[in-house]
Each structure stands twice: as C-alpha cells, then as structure tokens.
Amino acid sequence: MDYHTMREFADSWALLAMTLFFLGVALFAFRPGSRKAADEAARIPLKDD
C-alpha cells in the first residue's frame, strides 16, 4: 500500500469505524441501569478501607 491509498482509507472508512466505535461506547456507558454498575466500580478502590 502506498501513502495515498492509506490516507484515503483513513479519511473515509477508518474515520467512520472510529466514529461508530465512539458512539457505541457512549451509548453503552449512558444506557439505562448503568449507573449502579458505575457506582460499584467507583467504590472498588475504597472497599478495603
């Protein structure tokens, strides 16, 4: 692959893939019911105290 081909891929399909991945992670983090799991994960470092 030459630079031009890789650059064209990065500007189109790779950007689309990264955008979809970001939206998926954001939707997963803000889904209903995730607050309880996030609160439990936040308390893990303090459990031994």
Image (tube, rainbow, N blue to C red):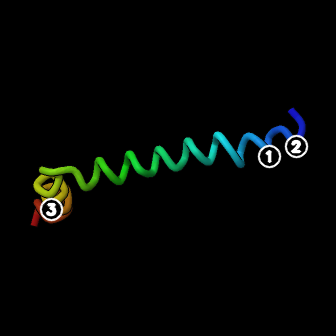
The image shows residue 15 at horizontal and vertical percentages of 62, 48
Q: Tell which of 48 and 28 is nearer to you.
A: 28
Question: Which of the labelled discs sits on residue 43, or is there none?
Answer: 3
Name the image quarter holding the C terminus: bottom left
Q: Residue at x 12, y 50 (%)?
A: 33
Question: Which of the labelled discs sits on residue 42, or is there none?
Answer: none
Q: Which residue is mark 1?
A: 7
Side of 37 where 10 appears, left or right: right
Q: Residue at x 86, y 32 (%)?
A: 1
Mark 1 to mark 2: distance in Å? 6 Å
Q: Is residue 35 above or below residue 15?
A: below
Q: Which residue is mark 2?
A: 3
Side of 29 where 19 appears, left or right: right
Q: Residue at x 48, y 45 (%)?
A: 20
Mark 3 to mark 2: distance in Å? 47 Å
Q: Tell which of 18 and 40 is nearer to you.
A: 18
Mark in front: 3 vs 2: 2
Mark in front: 3 vs 1: 1
Pointer 1 with pointer 2, Cβ within 8 A: yes
Side of 29 where 17 appears, left or right: right
Q: Earlier in the sequence, mark 3 or mark 1?
A: 1
Amino acid type of the residue that numbered disc 3 sits on in the rendered structure: Arg
